[in-house]
Amino acid sequence: MALSAQSRLKVLANPELAPGVCFINGCVGDGKRKFIDFGKNLEWYGVIYICTECIVEVAQAADYIPVASFDALYAEHRKLQVTFDQLKVKYEPFEKAIHNVVESRTSMPDLDIDNMRSRLSGVENSEDERNANEKSTVGESETNESDSVEGPDDLFDSSDFDD
């Protein structure tokens, strides 16, 4: 940023007047840093110069962020925000489906899911035992039932529930 012609501040490559050093760290210049002349003189000291390295340290101590660091953080934040938005759109149908399942379970307290599971597992166990018994008695006895006889109706329809 360029300074106006009326500014009290001057940016110099090297200190020009006595004492010719940075007021904070005493640096006399190394070609990498510049010096800021505030236009103030102290009696018995001289001109006050502060090097750019010390200005950066002061700015960071006051919670100012350099433009390059801010731009890098902003670019990374923007990239993460876009990724987050894409994932949110991708998984929104799953979230709605889970919400609907949980909501339907809580809205029908008379529908005891755990009781249904235990009854279904009991039916599966009895079918396994029956199959094991049929295999062990094949050819030893006759039955009066046809092979096409179906088991009990364990499927639920809307007439099974009380409204």
Image (cartoon, rainbow, N blue to C red):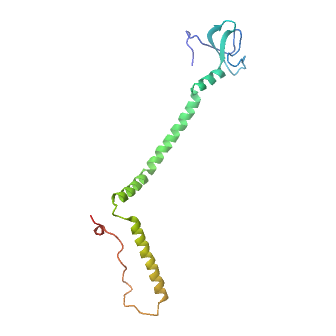
Which image quarter: residue 26? Answer: top right
Left or right: residue 57 versus residue 125 is right
Residue 143 percent coordinates (x, y) = 39, 91
Residue 144 percent coordinates (x, y) = 37, 91
Which image quarter holds the C terminus? bottom left
Up the image or down, 65 lies above or below 50; here it is below
**For the point 55% across and 12% down, which residue is it?**
4
Up the image or down, 77 lies above or below 131; here it is above
Which image quarter holds the N terminus? top right
Left or right: residue 56 versus residue 153 is right
**For the point 58% across and 27% down, which residue is it?**
66
Residue closest to the eye, 93 or 106 = 106
Residue 59 percent coordinates (x, y) = 59, 23
Which residue ends up furthest to the top in the rendered image?
43
Residue closest to the eye, 107 or 16 = 107
**For the point 40% across and 72% down, which residue is it?**
119
Left or right: residue 25 versus residue 128 is right
Residue 107 percent coordinates (x, y) = 34, 57
**For the point 51% across and 37% down, which residue is it?**
78
Which residue ends up furthest to the left in the rendered image?
163
Q: How many marks?
A: 0
